[in-house]
Image (spheres, rainbow, N blue to C red):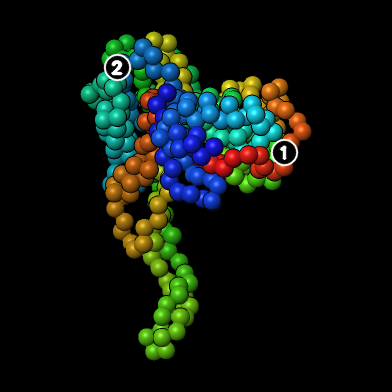
Amino acid sequence: MRFAAEAARQGLWREALFRWERQLKAHPGNARIHNNIAVASEGLGDYARALREYGEARRLDAESKDIRANHEALKELCRILKVCPEDDPASGPATDETATPPPAAPGGGPA
Amino acid sequence: MGVVACITAAVAADTVRVTIDVPVPARLDINGIERVLVTRLVVDQESRDLDLSRELVTLLRRELHKKTRLEILDVDPPSLPEQPLADLLANSGFWRRLAETHNADLVISGRAAFENSDRSGFVEQDEISPLTGQRVRRTRYVEREGFALGLSLFFIRGRTGRLEYEDEFTGERTVTGGGGDPLSVLYELFAQMESDMIGIVISKTKPEQRVLFAE
């Protein structure tokens, strides 16, 4: 995850997203990876996916303040700037069919 | 989609904070719009020694000229007929004729109010006593003047004469001491609003901070 975060630091969102997506396949219940995918999606302007991924991350780890803050910040951005699809769930957990229960321990999963 | 990100600070051992430049589209579709006419504004209230409409139109035209590729027509700002604002905005025939006369694709008009009021009063202030060196709380009378600017902007498509978009901006400033310069305060308040105003007609980016997990 650190390598992907480094790619994100350099603005290489597609590279970072590719790596996090690959990690997610191995660890689908990892809230942190869902969060990072959501951030990358925002960076790429895919707000619908970002909302879904934040929702899934919060479902998996309801206690994480960082994930909640990221999600709420995007929802506020959507409300003010109207940059998100209107029919997209701007609140509540995602119903992304790729999400795989049961959830891991909060924030858990491999690095 | 142009995105710049940088890790600005580590917020915890396993997290990093990144700044994303989120693309923000213009709020008004300006496809096909090149020539823009700014009219005089409807003034509800203005400060002493100040032609509010003239000052705001000058500021607005200057910002639009500087920060957009639109052609801002350099003409005497046309006056508006005296009628209730709702009727004026619905008067598509007037706007269409005005746009035709100036060959304008877009007409920008508005309504403004600039009020000043006496906000003097007693305030409590903490001071260090020169005698004892201790912090003491004193009540003092302070002269203050308050200024409030309210500005509504209307964007009317020249071809149809119809109102396409409207937005409202407000700002306040309190100046300590009497005799504040209304013009300086007006410029200051306008400067606080101008980025939002320009965002109506051009796309921008907005820096947003997010937290990534590195482990």
x then y, percent, for residue B201: 39, 25
Residue B193 to residue A17: above or below: below
x then y, percent, for residue A32: 61, 38
Instruction: Give the residue type at disc 2.
Output: Arg
Instruction: Give the residue type at disc 1.
Output: Ala
Q: Check disc 2 and report its element: helix, strand or loop.
A: strand
Which residue is disc 1 drawn over? Answer: A104
x then y, percent, for residue B214: 54, 42
Marks 1/2: CA–CA distance = 58 Å
Residue drawn at (48%, 36%) of the image: A3
To which quarter of the image does residue B51 belong?
A: top left
Pointer 1 chain: A
Residue B14 horizontal side relative to residue B183, left or right: right
| Quadrant for the C terminus of chain B in the image | top right
Which residue is disc 2 drawn over? Answer: B35
To which quarter of the image does residue B33 belong?
A: top left
